[in-house]
Amino acid sequence: MSEAVVSKRYAQALFQLGQERNIMDTLEQELLTVREVWATNKKFTTFLQHPKVTISKKKTVLSDVFQGFSKEVVHTLHLLADRHREEIIPEVIAHFITLVNESKGIAEAKVYSVRELSEEEKVQISSVFAQKLGKNQLKITNIIDPSILGGIKLRIGNRIYDGTVKGKLERMERKLVSANNR
């Protein structure tokens, strides 16, 4: 079975648990912390994925590192360690966050701009594009990209809205080239 399918199943099970026990916000915050630890601490992830480290040692370390977290999150991490699936932890978290966002009517968006956007600009972009997508809200991650020259580019899922100067120049170039080739 592919890792994507397996990670979706774990995420779905954790999501259902969160709904049943009405602890969705807690699970989301804890999993975001796990994702941060996973992304920033390579020694920790290397340790967890090392084949010579026993499962009981991995579970002990997971319990110590995530002490105070809900039993659902810790149990899920233990279950993944038991099944030698530590490498899919980030995918499980990503699928879980997607399920939570879908249930709340939230879409995640990457907004590329030349400079850091103000909170007011983020709110304005969120309201305009959330309405276009039929969502309640957009969670915006602002990415600074000086190569776009001006304007903004949004990536929401597999959709891209390009309102950058660079994008407009590239579209004009394609039109000119295709007009000359006729």
Image (cartoon, rainbow, N blue to C red):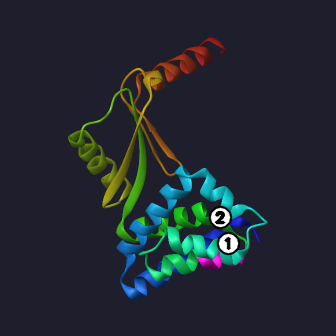
Residue denoted by label 1:
6
Which badge, 2 or 1, comes first in the chain's sequence?
A: 1
Q: Which residues are magenta?
A: 78-83
Q: Quadrant of the C terminus?
A: top right
Neighbor class of circle 2 (other Cα within 10 Å; few <14, some 14-19, many 20+) is some
As drawn, the residue found furthest toward the bottom would be 20
Residue at the image position 47 percent from the left and 19 percent from the top: 169
Q: Which of the pair 172/48 is nearer the observer? A: 48
Decide whether residue 81 is among the magenta residues. Answer: yes
Left or right, residue 61 beside residue 28: right
Q: Position of residue 32 (x, y in %)?
A: 44, 62
Q: CA distance from mark 2 to mark 1?
A: 8 Å
Q: Which of the pair 123/84 is nearer the observer? A: 84
Q: Which of the pair 58/149 is nearer the observer? A: 58
Left or right, residue 54 beside residue 79: right
Q: Which of the pair 41/17 is nearer the observer? A: 41
Indicate the secondary structure of the residue bearing disc 1. helix
Residue denoted by label 2:
88
Q: Quadrant of residue 120?
A: top left
Q: The disc labelled 2 sits on which kind of residue?
A: Ile
Residue 87 visible to the viewer: no
Neighbor class of circle 1 (other Cα within 10 Å; few <14, some 14-19, many 20+) is some
As drawn, the residue found furthest toward the top would be 180
Decide whether residue 18 is among the magenta residues. Answer: no
Q: Quadrant of the N terminus?
A: bottom right
- Magenta segment, principal secondary structure? helix
Residue at the image position 58 percent from the left and 67 percent from the top: 92
